[in-house]
Image (spheres, rainbow, N blue to C red):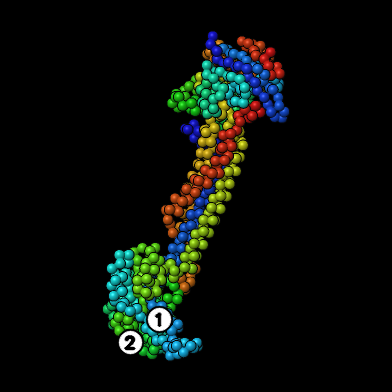
Amino acid sequence: MSVALQAEKLNKYFHEPDDFHVLQDISFTVNKGEFVPVIGKSGCGKSTLLYLLSTLDTDYNGKITINDTLVTGKNQNELARFRNEHIGFVFQFHFLLPEFTALENVMLPALKLGKFSKEEIEENAMEKLKQLQMDDFAHKLSGKLSGGQQQRVAIARALINNPAIIMADEPTGNLDSINTGLVFDIFRDLSHNKGITILTVTHDLDFAKNADRAIEMADGRIK
Amino acid sequence: MLVNTLIAKRHLLANKKQTMVAMMGVCFGIAMFILMISFMIGVNQFMEDTMLSSTPDIHIYNDIKTDYTTSIAGDYFKNKNTLVVVHHPKPKQVKLNIKNADGIINNLKKDADISFVSPLLSTQVFYNYGPVQINGYINGVNIMQEAKIFDLANKMTDGTPENLLSADKGIIMGHGLADKLNLGMGDMVTLATPAGTTMRFRVVGLFKIGIGTIDNTRSYVNLANVQQLMGQDRSYITDINIKLRNNKLASPKADEFFKKLGYKSDDWETANASVLAGNIVRDVLTYVVSITLLVVAGFGIYNIMNMTINNKMKDIAILKAQGFAGRDIVQIFLSQSLFIGFFGAIMGEILGFLLAYALSRVPFPHNEFISLKFFPVIFNPAHYLFGMAFGVITPFIAGLMPSLKASRIDPVAILRG
């Protein structure tokens, strides 16, 4: 199996309010098509790790390789482009753009990438929504959808550019158990049947138990 | 780029009220600028036109120079080691005419910068009509040249300048003067010079320049009549009026003529320095007020953009996470600001034009010294272009800072909550 993501000796410090060594010598690899939750107590650094891996936070020591590309040391514009093409995001607070419809929210990253025509993108986005059973709500303003529906739209959006890896920060943190189950099934389906790597930070131990394997963190280290 | 525009458009449409308010700010700024500049420049233009209708581009005349430095007394007491002091010397009798006037005029006519030359003999007279006697003056002119310099044909209220040529001893009289004397077309009037000679003229035309002091005192007659009235020969003239092809050349040309001819040469700018100073003051005032209005509009945009960006922190973070670079964020928000500026400016130009047009239709309060029917307003495309440029540059500057701030937002800090 080929490697989707590799972290080597990641170290990260917070300087505010006090100097704090939040990540200590983190090294691990995730293979393509794996569904890996990162678990641990609040403040153990798991979210920090995710933002490092997602290239949004560049203030760290160590090396990160995604999809055989070394992302450490790239400039902000290159990273933005890289994220657009290779990484899909799902967050705890769904973060859809409220002025746009569900369909348009899904389309935006693809329009930004600019690889396909608008018609192709629209078709593709519709397909992703169908995959998540959200096609009935495609033309509704995203602000009008429920939490679970918004999260499914957010997942469709993460998928639109066919990324190698999806990173999720507490994707079920704001959802009831039915929707949590739904999101879990979607993730497992994506990783097992579509070969998409999924790395997700979660509090939800049930969620973690059913995954392929879990990375457990405590006090800035992997247990 | 296209995506960024799409997002910018949605942001603007989602907050229609706020967008409109920001646009109104620019709109009023530009409208006031257009209104003020159209009116102020209109006033300047009116002043300049009035001024030029009474002042030739260059006026050459014989300035009376009284030279008291030499005295015959000095000759008389020569070499006697005596200090000679003469109290209250009187100037000797001088002729005020321009010598060799014909030669000078012929020479001037050859100058390529000059379009018209008009010789003039002016003298003070008393207008007698029955018991009424009014002090004024007459200009003896070659009416065709004089008419061209001051555009008299358009200022006649009765008759035409040509009437002077066909009538023996005709007079074209200022409108106000004719009113005072109760004279109409075809009436006779007697003119008396300070020297005591009199001559009768027939009114063949009335003119109104719009400046009280001229309309109430001046008349035109043929040059020969004045020469005759004054008992002078056919070459006796006191002034030469010149119209240039380009009146901006007046000042250097006047210097040149003074050096060449030795007679005093006044250009219109020197003769009307106070009016031109007034023009400059109005120009400065216009720009100061307009820029102030636009700066205020700029602050309005700055505020609204700042507010929008504070409300959209989450959106900016999510856009960045999805691969929108800092440059894209600047584009999204700056284009909103420019959109507000552009359409605000267009609205402002239209409103400004309508206001300026309305003002140009407002009757000017009646006044016997200036002839002005409506408020003077001019419509110059350059002002509209300038307003447009202002309307785009101000929002650009006002929007740039908030947009740059937005592009520097750290998505991690916001996404983590």
| Furthest residue in direction right, as rendered | A18
Q: Report the residue marked by disc 2.
A: B231
Using the rendered view, name the quadrant where residue B171 is placed.
bottom left
Q: Report the residue marked by disc 1.
A: B137
The residue lying toward the viewer, choosing from B232 and B343, is B232
Q: Quadrant of the C terminus of chain B?
A: top right
x, y percent for residue B227:
32, 83
* Rendered position, A66 above or below B291: above
Q: Is residue B287 left or right of residue B268?
A: right
Residue pictured at 55% horizontal, 44% vertical: B398
Residue pictured at 52% horizontal, 33% vertical: B327
The residue lying toward the viewer, choosing from A163 and A104, is A163
Which mark lies nearer to you, 1 or 2?
2
x, y percent for residue B313:
61, 33
Residue A179 appearing in the image:
no
Residue pictured at 54% horizontal, 50% vertical: B294
Label 1 vs label 2: CA separation? 16 Å
* Rendered position, A203 above or below B67: above
> Local crowd at mark 1 within 10 Å, few (<14), some, or many (≥20)?
many
Residue B75 appearing in the image:
yes
**Three-letter code, disc 1:** Tyr
x, y percent for residue B233:
30, 84
| Furthest residue in direction top, as rendered | A1
> Local crowd at mark 2 within 10 Å, few (<14), some, or many (≥20)?
few
Q: Of helix, strand and loop, which one carries label 1?
A: strand
x, y percent for residue B138:
38, 80
Please give the label number shown on residue A72: none
* Rendered position, A27 above or below B129: above
**Three-letter code, disc 2:** Gly
Residue at mark 2: chain: B
